[in-house]
Image (cartoon, helix red, strand yellow):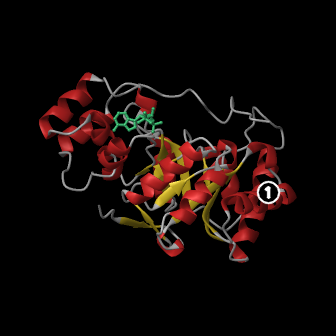
Protein backbone atom coordinates (compact mmCIF):
# COMPACT_ATOMS: atom_id res chain seq x y z
CA UNK A 1 0.00 0.00 0.00
CA UNK A 2 1.59 3.28 -1.13
CA UNK A 3 0.74 6.18 1.15
CA UNK A 4 0.99 9.68 -0.36
CA UNK A 5 3.23 12.21 1.39
CA UNK A 6 2.75 15.68 2.79
CA UNK A 7 5.56 18.26 2.89
CA UNK A 8 6.16 19.96 6.20
CA UNK A 9 7.05 23.67 6.28
CA UNK A 10 10.77 22.80 6.58
CA UNK A 11 10.74 20.49 3.55
CA UNK A 12 10.60 17.17 5.40
CA UNK A 13 8.15 14.74 3.77
CA UNK A 14 5.81 12.69 5.97
CA UNK A 15 3.18 10.09 5.06
CA UNK A 16 -0.43 11.30 4.91
CA UNK A 17 -1.45 8.72 7.54
CA UNK A 18 0.56 7.27 10.43
CA UNK A 19 0.44 4.64 13.13
CA UNK A 20 -0.39 5.65 16.71
CA UNK A 21 1.23 3.53 19.40
CA UNK A 22 -0.55 4.84 22.50
CA UNK A 23 -2.10 1.42 23.12
CA UNK A 24 1.01 -0.62 22.39
CA UNK A 25 2.59 -2.02 25.57
CA UNK A 26 6.37 -1.98 26.15
CA UNK A 27 6.73 -5.70 25.67
CA UNK A 28 6.69 -8.40 23.01
CA UNK A 29 3.03 -7.65 22.16
CA UNK A 30 3.76 -3.96 21.57
CA UNK A 31 6.83 -4.77 19.56
CA UNK A 32 4.85 -7.20 17.43
CA UNK A 33 2.08 -4.63 16.83
CA UNK A 34 4.55 -2.01 15.57
CA UNK A 35 6.48 -4.58 13.55
CA UNK A 36 3.21 -5.65 11.90
CA UNK A 37 2.20 -2.05 11.23
CA UNK A 38 5.50 -1.40 9.43
CA UNK A 39 5.13 -4.66 7.52
CA UNK A 40 1.69 -3.66 6.28
CA UNK A 41 2.92 -0.29 5.02
CA UNK A 42 2.98 2.32 7.79
CA UNK A 43 6.05 4.53 7.62
CA UNK A 44 5.06 7.24 10.14
CA UNK A 45 5.26 5.83 13.66
CA UNK A 46 4.05 7.98 16.54
CA UNK A 47 5.11 7.38 20.13
CA UNK A 48 5.80 9.50 23.22
CA UNK A 49 7.86 9.12 26.36
CA UNK A 50 4.53 9.21 28.19
CA UNK A 51 3.39 6.03 26.43
CA UNK A 52 6.31 4.21 28.10
CA UNK A 53 6.81 2.01 25.04
CA UNK A 54 9.75 3.62 23.25
CA UNK A 55 11.91 0.55 23.85
CA UNK A 56 9.41 -1.80 22.13
CA UNK A 57 8.86 0.71 19.31
CA UNK A 58 12.62 0.98 18.78
CA UNK A 59 13.05 -2.78 18.72
CA UNK A 60 10.26 -3.13 16.16
CA UNK A 61 11.95 -0.49 13.98
CA UNK A 62 15.29 -2.27 14.26
CA UNK A 63 13.71 -5.60 13.34
CA UNK A 64 11.48 -4.25 10.57
CA UNK A 65 13.97 -4.63 7.75
CA UNK A 66 12.83 -1.21 6.48
CA UNK A 67 15.59 1.37 6.00
CA UNK A 68 15.86 3.97 8.73
CA UNK A 69 15.58 6.74 6.14
CA UNK A 70 12.23 5.39 4.95
CA UNK A 71 10.67 5.77 8.41
CA UNK A 72 9.37 8.90 10.09
CA UNK A 73 9.67 8.31 13.83
CA UNK A 74 7.92 10.73 16.17
CA UNK A 75 8.25 11.04 19.91
CA UNK A 76 7.26 13.72 22.42
CA UNK A 77 8.59 15.48 25.50
CA UNK A 78 6.34 14.83 28.50
CA UNK A 79 4.83 17.52 30.73
CA UNK A 80 7.10 16.63 33.64
CA UNK A 81 10.13 17.37 31.44
CA UNK A 82 9.16 20.84 30.24
CA UNK A 83 11.90 23.49 30.40
CA UNK A 84 15.23 23.89 28.60
CA UNK A 85 17.64 21.52 30.37
CA UNK A 86 15.05 18.90 31.20
CA UNK A 87 13.82 18.77 27.60
CA UNK A 88 17.39 18.15 26.39
CA UNK A 89 17.77 15.37 28.97
CA UNK A 90 14.36 13.90 28.07
CA UNK A 91 15.35 13.80 24.42
CA UNK A 92 18.52 11.87 25.25
CA UNK A 93 16.47 9.33 27.23
CA UNK A 94 13.93 8.93 24.40
CA UNK A 95 16.59 8.54 21.72
CA UNK A 96 18.36 5.97 23.85
CA UNK A 97 15.17 4.00 24.57
CA UNK A 98 14.32 4.05 20.86
CA UNK A 99 17.88 3.04 19.99
CA UNK A 100 18.06 5.86 17.42
CA UNK A 101 20.74 8.45 16.84
CA UNK A 102 18.17 10.86 15.41
CA UNK A 103 14.41 11.28 15.66
CA UNK A 104 12.41 12.55 12.69
CA UNK A 105 9.81 14.56 14.53
CA UNK A 106 10.00 15.72 18.15
CA UNK A 107 6.91 17.32 19.70
CA UNK A 108 5.97 19.12 22.91
CA UNK A 109 3.28 16.72 24.15
CA UNK A 110 1.03 19.30 25.85
CA UNK A 111 1.43 23.06 26.25
CA UNK A 112 1.76 24.53 29.71
CA UNK A 113 -1.41 26.61 29.99
CA UNK A 114 -2.69 29.45 32.16
CA UNK A 115 -4.70 27.02 34.29
CA UNK A 116 -1.60 24.99 35.10
CA UNK A 117 1.12 27.63 35.61
CA UNK A 118 1.22 31.44 35.83
CA UNK A 119 4.43 31.46 33.80
CA UNK A 120 3.07 29.10 31.13
CA UNK A 121 4.34 31.26 28.28
CA UNK A 122 7.89 31.22 29.62
CA UNK A 123 7.75 27.45 30.20
CA UNK A 124 6.64 26.76 26.63
CA UNK A 125 9.23 29.18 25.24
CA UNK A 126 12.03 27.47 27.20
CA UNK A 127 10.91 24.00 26.08
CA UNK A 128 10.76 25.28 22.52
CA UNK A 129 14.27 26.78 22.77
CA UNK A 130 15.56 23.28 23.61
CA UNK A 131 13.65 21.80 20.67
CA UNK A 132 15.23 24.42 18.37
CA UNK A 133 18.67 23.46 19.65
CA UNK A 134 18.01 19.77 18.91
CA UNK A 135 16.94 20.80 15.41
CA UNK A 136 20.05 22.91 14.81
CA UNK A 137 22.25 20.07 16.06
CA UNK A 138 20.64 17.67 13.58
CA UNK A 139 19.39 15.36 16.31
CA UNK A 140 15.83 15.81 15.00
CA UNK A 141 14.68 16.49 11.45
CA UNK A 142 11.62 18.52 12.42
CA UNK A 143 10.08 19.92 15.61
CA UNK A 144 6.53 20.63 16.52
CA UNK A 145 3.90 20.75 19.20
CA UNK A 146 0.85 18.82 20.24
CA UNK A 147 -2.44 19.93 21.74
CA UNK A 148 -1.58 23.60 21.23
CA UNK A 149 -4.59 25.87 20.83
CA UNK A 150 -4.53 29.26 19.13
CA UNK A 151 -3.42 31.08 22.28
CA UNK A 152 -0.47 28.73 22.82
CA UNK A 153 0.62 29.05 19.19
CA UNK A 154 0.27 32.84 19.31
CA UNK A 155 2.35 33.04 22.49
CA UNK A 156 5.07 30.82 21.01
CA UNK A 157 5.18 32.90 17.82
CA UNK A 158 5.93 35.99 19.95
CA UNK A 159 8.95 34.21 21.45
CA UNK A 160 10.47 32.40 18.47
CA UNK A 161 10.83 32.78 14.72
CA UNK A 162 10.91 29.02 14.27
CA UNK A 163 7.38 27.94 13.36
CA UNK A 164 6.38 24.44 14.54
CA UNK A 165 6.30 22.01 11.61
CA UNK A 166 3.38 20.11 13.15
CA UNK A 167 0.59 20.48 15.69
CA UNK A 168 -0.88 17.14 16.71
CA UNK A 169 -4.42 17.54 18.08
CA UNK A 170 -7.47 15.43 18.82
CA UNK A 171 -9.28 15.34 15.48
CA UNK A 172 -12.22 13.17 14.44
CA UNK A 173 -15.78 13.58 13.16
CA UNK A 174 -17.58 15.49 15.88
CA UNK A 175 -14.40 17.17 17.12
CA UNK A 176 -12.45 19.06 14.49
CA UNK A 177 -11.21 22.04 16.55
CA UNK A 178 -11.84 24.42 13.67
CA UNK A 179 -10.24 27.47 15.30
CA UNK A 180 -6.96 25.64 15.94
CA UNK A 181 -7.12 24.10 12.48
CA UNK A 182 -7.43 27.47 10.75
CA UNK A 183 -4.65 28.98 12.91
CA UNK A 184 -2.39 26.13 11.78
CA UNK A 185 -3.33 26.56 8.12
CA UNK A 186 -2.55 30.28 8.27
CA UNK A 187 0.96 29.51 9.58
CA UNK A 188 1.63 26.45 7.38
CA UNK A 189 1.71 24.15 10.40
CA UNK A 190 0.75 20.60 9.38
CA UNK A 191 -1.96 19.11 11.56
CA UNK A 192 -1.83 15.52 12.77
CA UNK A 193 -4.95 13.97 14.28
CA UNK A 194 -4.86 11.79 17.39
CA UNK A 195 -7.80 9.52 18.16
CA UNK A 196 -9.06 9.89 14.58
CA UNK A 197 -11.76 7.31 15.37
CA UNK A 198 -12.73 9.14 18.56
CA UNK A 199 -11.34 6.09 20.40
CA UNK A 200 -14.23 4.16 18.68
CA UNK A 201 -16.83 6.50 20.22
CA UNK A 202 -17.96 7.76 16.80
CA UNK A 203 -18.10 4.40 15.01
CA UNK A 204 -21.85 3.95 15.57
CA UNK A 205 -22.84 7.43 14.47
CA UNK A 206 -25.81 7.06 12.05
CA UNK A 207 -24.53 9.65 9.55
CA UNK A 208 -21.11 8.00 9.38
CA UNK A 209 -22.68 4.55 9.13
CA UNK A 210 -24.82 5.63 6.17
CA UNK A 211 -21.87 7.24 4.35
CA UNK A 212 -19.80 4.10 4.99
CA UNK A 213 -22.58 1.94 3.49
CA UNK A 214 -22.78 4.16 0.41
CA UNK A 215 -19.05 3.65 -0.24
CA UNK A 216 -18.86 -0.01 0.82
CA UNK A 217 -16.24 1.00 3.41
CA UNK A 218 -15.96 0.78 7.18
CA UNK A 219 -16.88 3.73 9.38
CA UNK A 220 -13.24 3.88 10.48
CA UNK A 221 -12.19 4.39 6.86
CA UNK A 222 -14.75 7.20 6.47
CA UNK A 223 -13.34 8.97 9.56
CA UNK A 224 -9.79 8.62 8.27
CA UNK A 225 -10.59 9.63 4.70
CA UNK A 226 -12.41 12.71 6.03
CA UNK A 227 -9.24 13.68 7.94
CA UNK A 228 -7.07 13.10 4.87
CA UNK A 229 -9.35 15.27 2.69
CA UNK A 230 -8.98 18.03 5.28
CA UNK A 231 -5.20 17.72 4.88
CA UNK A 232 -4.94 16.34 8.41
CA UNK A 233 -2.61 13.38 9.01
CA UNK A 234 -4.59 10.83 11.04
CA UNK A 235 -2.74 8.53 13.46
CA UNK A 236 -5.06 5.56 13.99
CA UNK A 237 -3.96 2.88 16.39
CA UNK A 238 -4.89 -0.76 16.36
CA UNK A 239 -3.36 -3.94 17.67
CA UNK A 240 -5.08 -5.97 14.92
CA UNK A 241 -3.47 -6.61 11.55
CA UNK A 242 -6.71 -6.54 9.56
CA UNK A 243 -7.67 -3.15 11.00
CA UNK A 244 -4.15 -1.78 10.54
CA UNK A 245 -4.39 -2.62 6.85
CA UNK A 246 -7.91 -1.20 6.54
CA UNK A 247 -6.81 2.06 8.18
CA UNK A 248 -4.28 2.90 5.46
CA UNK A 249 -6.46 1.71 2.61
CA UNK A 250 -7.84 5.21 2.06
CA UNK A 251 -6.54 6.38 -1.27
CA UNK A 252 -8.81 4.71 -3.82
CA UNK A 253 -12.05 6.47 -2.90
CA UNK A 254 -13.14 9.96 -1.92
CA UNK A 255 -15.93 11.67 -0.07
CA UNK A 256 -18.09 14.16 -1.98
CA UNK A 257 -18.20 17.83 -0.94
CA UNK A 258 -21.73 17.17 0.40
CA UNK A 259 -20.53 14.25 2.51
CA UNK A 260 -17.57 16.28 3.79
CA UNK A 261 -19.87 19.17 4.73
CA UNK A 262 -22.33 16.84 6.46
CA UNK A 263 -19.55 15.33 8.59
CA UNK A 264 -18.13 18.79 9.32
CA UNK A 265 -21.55 19.80 10.64
CA UNK A 266 -21.85 16.95 13.14
CA UNK A 267 -22.59 18.13 16.68
CA UNK A 268 -19.83 17.59 19.28
CA UNK A 269 -19.38 13.82 19.45
CA UNK A 270 -16.92 11.45 21.03
CA UNK A 271 -14.34 13.95 22.28
CA UNK A 272 -11.97 12.81 25.02
CA UNK A 273 -12.47 15.88 27.19
CA UNK A 274 -8.70 16.24 27.58
CA UNK A 275 -7.50 19.84 27.30
CA UNK A 276 -4.26 21.64 28.21
CA UNK A 277 -6.11 23.01 31.24
CA UNK A 278 -7.02 19.64 32.73
CA UNK A 279 -4.11 17.48 31.67
CA UNK A 280 -1.19 17.54 34.04
CA UNK A 281 0.68 14.28 34.01
CA UNK A 282 3.24 15.32 36.61
P1 LIG B 1 -8.06 -2.44 18.33
O1 LIG B 1 -6.65 -2.13 18.80
O2 LIG B 1 -8.68 -3.55 19.10
O3 LIG B 1 -8.17 -2.60 16.83
P2 LIG B 1 -8.36 5.96 18.10
O4 LIG B 1 -7.23 5.76 17.13
O5 LIG B 1 -9.40 6.92 17.63
O6 LIG B 1 -7.89 6.32 19.49
O7 LIG B 1 -9.11 4.56 18.24
C1 LIG B 1 -8.40 3.44 18.69
C2 LIG B 1 -9.38 2.34 18.94
O8 LIG B 1 -10.05 2.02 17.73
C3 LIG B 1 -8.72 1.08 19.41
O9 LIG B 1 -9.51 0.62 20.49
C4 LIG B 1 -8.78 0.12 18.22
O10 LIG B 1 -9.00 -1.18 18.70
C5 LIG B 1 -9.99 0.61 17.47
N1 LIG B 1 -9.88 0.48 16.01
C6 LIG B 1 -8.80 0.77 15.26
N2 LIG B 1 -9.05 0.60 13.95
C7 LIG B 1 -10.33 0.17 13.87
C8 LIG B 1 -11.17 -0.18 12.77
N3 LIG B 1 -10.74 -0.12 11.52
N4 LIG B 1 -12.44 -0.57 13.06
C9 LIG B 1 -12.87 -0.63 14.34
N5 LIG B 1 -12.13 -0.29 15.41
C10 LIG B 1 -10.86 0.10 15.19
**Residue appearing at x 33%, y 62% in the figure:** 3
SS of the residue at dot 1?
Answer: helix
Which residue is the extreme one toward the front?
Answer: 28
What is the quadrant of the N terminus in the image? bottom left
Instruction: Residue 71: give x, y in percent of width and height.
Output: 50, 67
Label 1 C-beta lies within 8 Å of the nearest ligand 1 atom: no
Q: Is residue 270 left or right of residue 123?
A: left
* Residue 11 visible in the current orientation: no
What is the quadrant of the C terminus in the image? top right
Q: Nearer the viewer, residue 135 or 25?
A: 25
Q: In this view, does 2 lie to the left or right of 100?
A: left
Q: Which of 146 and 20 is in front in this view?
A: 20
Which residue is the extreme one toward the right?
Answer: 85
Which image quadrant for residue 220?
Answer: top left
Tell how many labels: 1
**Residue appearing at x 44%, y 58% in the figure:** 38
Instruction: Residue 44: give x, y in percent of width and height.
Output: 48, 59
Task: State whether residue 184 is above or below residue 71.
Answer: above
Task: State whether residue 168 is above or below residue 42.
Answer: above
Instruction: Residue 189: give x, y in percent of width and height.
Output: 51, 59
Q: In this view, does 202 lie to the left or right of 188?
A: left
Where in the image, quadrant-wise, is ligand 1 located? top left
* Residue 257 visible in the current orientation: yes
Instruction: Residue 18: give x, y in percent of width and height.
Output: 44, 54
Tell me the residue that label 1 is attached to.
87
Amino acid sequence: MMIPEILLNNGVAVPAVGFGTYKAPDDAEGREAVRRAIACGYRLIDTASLYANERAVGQAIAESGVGRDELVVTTKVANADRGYDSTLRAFDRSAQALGLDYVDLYLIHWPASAAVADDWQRINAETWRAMCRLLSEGRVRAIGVSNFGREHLDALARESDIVPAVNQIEFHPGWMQLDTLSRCREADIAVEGWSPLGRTRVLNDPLLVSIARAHGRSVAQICLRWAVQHGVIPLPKSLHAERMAQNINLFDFSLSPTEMAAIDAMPPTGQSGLTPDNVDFR
